[in-house]
Image (cartoon, grey):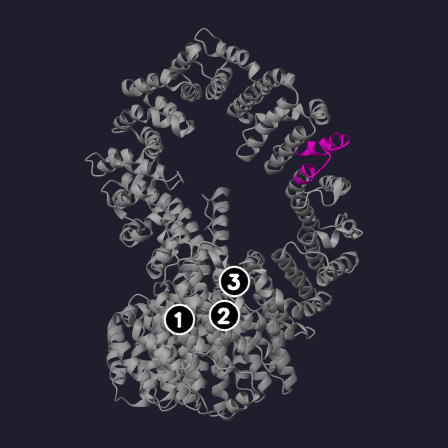
Amino acid sequence: MTKAYLMTSLVEKMQSPDQDFRFMGLNDLMNEIKQDQTCFVGDEAVENKVLMQVLALVEDKISEVKNQAVKCLGQLIKIIRQPQMETVVDKLIDFSGGQDEELRDISGLALKTITAELPPDGKIAATACSKLTPKLLGQISNPTTPPEALVETLAILTILISRFPAHLSSATLSPQPLTVLAPLLVHPRPVVRKRAIVTLAQFVPISQGYLFTDLLATHVFPFLAPNANLEKQRTTVHLIAAVARTAPTQIAPVLAEIVPGVLKAVQRDDDELREGGLQALEALLLRCPTEITPYVAPITQAGIQYIKYDPNYAGDDEDEEMADADDDDDEAELDEYSDDEDTSYKIRRSATKLLAAIVGTRPDLLSSIYKDVSPVLISRFGDREETVRLEVWATYVVLLNQTALYASQPQSKAPEDSSLKRKRDPETMDVEEGPYSLLKAQVPALSKALLNQLKSAKTPPATLQAGFALLHTLLDVLPGSLASQVASIAATSKSILSQPPSTSTSTLHLACLSFLVLFFATHSPPTFTPSLSNLTPALLRSLGERHPRVASETFRVFSALLNALKPVKAGGEWAEAVYEQAVARLTAHDTDAEVRACAEACVGDLWVCATDVVRSRDRREWEVICRAGAKTEGAVKVVTRVAKEVPGALGDQWVNGCVEWAMGLLKRGGRGGKMEIFQGLDVLLRSYTEGVPAALPPALVPQIKPYLSTSDIPLLSQGLSLLALLLELAPTTTFPEIESDLLPDVYRIAHSPLVSGAALDSLLSFCAALVSADNQIATHLVPNLVIAVEKAPKADASPSNVAKAVAQIVKSQQAIAAGTIAQYAKNIKKTSKAKTQTVVLSLLILGELGRFIDMSNQQDIFRDAIEHFAGEQEEIRAAASFAAGNIAIGNLPQFLPAIVKIVKSDPKKRLLSLHALKEVVTHCSQGQLEGVADMLWVPLFENSENSEETTRNVAAACLGKLATTHPSRYLPQLHARVQDPSADARATVVSAIRYTFAETSSSYDELLAPLLVDFLSLMLDEDLTVRRLALSALNSAARTKPHLIREHLPALLPSLYRETIINPDLIRTVQMGPWTHKVDDGLDARKTAYETMYTLLDTCLAKLELPTFLGRVLPGLADDSDEIKVISHMMLFRLSQVAPAAVSQKLDEATPELEKTMKGATVTKDTVKQDLERAAELQRSALRAVAALSKIAGNGASPRFDAFVEELKKNPQWGSEFKELAAQA
């Protein structure tokens, strides 16, 4: 309820004749409302009294009081009633249209404040818009409104339309905004025209089409004529640019009438018009990328023409070889032409940005850009205006980045290998006219022009930093390309590093050092060795800097230098000096953590690359590196590298010390760094020159025991691998420790279903090593493993893992094979009364053994396995299928015909026998398969038709594998069935082709290439299943054999994009009890299509037309499927890195759906915990995308997106996570 007594006292304060009291009364009211809104709301009479008093103070004579009253209205507008809000709006509009200038200004400010503070949700915003907008439009149409009031009114309208476009578009505004605002385009005051353009452009997207057509006919087309009034033409080009940014879809259809006129306007002799015209062309290029394509060539020519526009400078514009700019005479000569009134630099800057837009959005034109635009950009590297110069350099960085992403890449990083051509991959060929070769030819001119700009002593730090960033990018794209400029680079670097870093120059030092790291890493030593004596003194000085980042980056420079010059012989002074400096940093207690880490890495590099230099030292560095500090990850990596690269250089005593230190680290709690410690121990154990000491295994094995647990599978894998290595290197001392202490843990781990992949491989290696260390143990291991799995609860038992372990033990100790086979063959006989679990395990063990043991002498085992095809339990049938297939591998001629016969003749057992064949096809060697392929091909194909999908998939997997054994024979057979009348047959064909892509060998690429498009054309099939499988095949091809599909993508992509559109015909309603539920049969195909798009983004980026691609990513943000939303978020994340220019233009379209996702699930009475968890996961996915997009959203590309990001930063739930993700992006 309203605190009437409090409000009354505040009103009395506000009525005080003392200005300070009035100010404090307003201030107290504002604070009270912020703390507790209910103190104002409740009693309408008191509310009105307070509100009227605040409005009265808007007219106060004291400025501070008026401003405070405006702030107070900003708080009140969020909580007052609708009639009160109308009163406030009416009053303020009356003030803003009056003749009192001061009152007009303050009321304009008040209206701006309340429109900016209106809460985005709720009815009050809609009411405010419907009430305020007509009044504002009325004020604009009133001919007596003074220009100052017009500017304020337009600003308020702009806030309303940018914050509440939905409310304004749904409101029936009379008069229409475009009709009211258009006359302001010819207002005599430029400031009114400028503001009107901004407001008008924002109203275009929500206005009816005919109004925009009228606007074009009256205020755009007539003023694009060559003889139009200059003033009106300037306004027109600014309007075109603004509309292009806010309403690209509306302006795109009329580009044919607009672009030629703007190109002609640019040629008129008026600097402001030229600048505006170039900006309009840039906006059209970015916002209408598809429709502008026919005009890219003339627009590029306009950019090239005006980047050289400098009428006040008499130099030779066309000279591409930049003259040396280091003479003071030259600089003095340039100064003669500088003029405060000279605005030609604005035209050059706009032309540069125009070219940057072309470079950033037209990767398909890279070669022609290198021929036409690049030489001109290089010729302008020395522009006399610094802002233009930096813009030119930034544009060239964009060009280099585009080259790295989209151009055909040299196969090797090394410069001398860059002409190599990858076999059968035209995409990676460094063709003569390709961007890489064109860039290579221009590097000498580029580097000379740039370094001339950097070597002057007067060059500001920011410019030098930008120059080094450009050089760094050049080396990223074309490693080793600056060999001819080593002397200039060394001289410039020396002059920078010789100055002590200050607050303003430390980032320049870091840019220079970061560049040198890359320079030394990518150039061969003979190119830079002569300049080292000139550069190393300055680098050694930087090593001693107090600035931690400078010191750490300098250590990285020396690390790169050591690796480049490896091996460094004794006698080099700088290597010894680096060693001393590194040891000094490591022994000092106040050394920064990053400097310490880089010094440790540098010591490692010294031992690896300059062994002769450090071998004779006292090795005190290792005492400090192998310390029990908080952060040891870097130290572990250094020790591991030295032990691996120079084994024996430091002797067994050093290895012992390091092993003890690493064992101490294993005892620590937490998981951090443990993987690296295990890897380090692996390397250290192998580096003993005189064998592992006898005392080590008894000490090390107990340290590994805690990690033999399924709570951390990666560490379990490392622990088992280390035990296997110990058994291999020191079997006699290690085996007793393991036998007495660890075997129960091993039995428990072996049957865990969590153990798979690398961990399972480690377990099998451990079993093999254990049996090799002691032959007798095999007879104990097998029964104990089986007993452990049989005793385990079903959920914790994986019989297939135990079967693999038993097979590994038998393989290592063949003497127990016969006994093991006999033991488990008993359990699968018809007469056996073994439990289901025992039968399953026995079948799996026999299958694993049958893979490498010929059981043709015990055919009853195979027959018994086949008998179990008719078993009651699903798990027995699956195990029987596994056993039969793998036993057949041991003797294909003997057993395979029996399985094929079942495939042909027994429909009930067909699926199981196909699974058995899949085992054969998967685990046979290539040679074995070639011999039996003919026997399998026909039955597989015939029996996959007219079958259920599961059966068909298994058969297709086998057919795909067989096709790779003899591609010239089988691929044409598959191709012949592409147009088969049976949808099942077509589905089998396309599934089989998908499985051929799993074979990474390129041996059959030439055979597959001409047939591939026909296979993938099944994306147009009338059958939904066939279409989905074809999409899946395209996804596999894009992932494993992208070079085969790149050239065909223009034909394939329309079919792919079509499948991303929701088809209402495939959505049906299902009745489930009292509820109805919608089922989308097209969802699986749509999901596969989006997955394929994501894959193509990684492997075929250069062949994607990004505007069209983005046009299908954005609808995915609004899809009903959360999985498709997540894939779309991932694509936006990736696109923000590879196509920032294209994505930044679509932020307005992406923002509403991202906002909707970030609001989370609507909680109803039916909402369950899983719904909330799913929504939170989806929000995190969106958050990652927004964090990445926020990095490219600069320059006000989307005010709505910027506001959304600001809201997220303040969000109590997501703010901190968002900032963290943004820092990583």
How far apart are the two marked residues, 1 and 2, measured between alpha carbons?
A: 48 Å
Q: Are there few (<14), some (14-19), or many (20+) residues within 10 Å of tag 3?
A: many
Q: Is residue 42 visible?
A: no
Q: CA distance from mark 3 to mark 2?
A: 68 Å
Crowdedness of circle 2 by 10 Å Cα count: few (<14), some, many (20+)? many
- How far across and down, in percent of the image, does residue 478 sit? 48, 62
Q: Nearer the observer, disc 3 or disc 2?
A: 3
| Boundaries of the magenta span | 683-708
* Few, some or many residues within 10 Å of mark 1 (<14, 14–19, 20+): many
Residue 393 colored magenta? no
The image shows residue 993, relative to residue 917, as above or below, that is: below
Sequence-first disc among 1 and 2: 2
Specify the quadrant that holds the N terminus: bottom right
Q: Are marks 3 and 2 in contact (CB under 8 Å)?
A: no
Q: Which residue has dot 2 on it?
A: 80
Query: Tag count in the figure?
Result: 3
Q: Main secondary structure of the magenta part?
A: helix
Q: Which residue is mark 1?
A: 357
2 and 314: which one is in front?
314
Q: Secondary structure at mark 2?
A: loop
Please name the residue that numbered disc 3 is placed on: 480
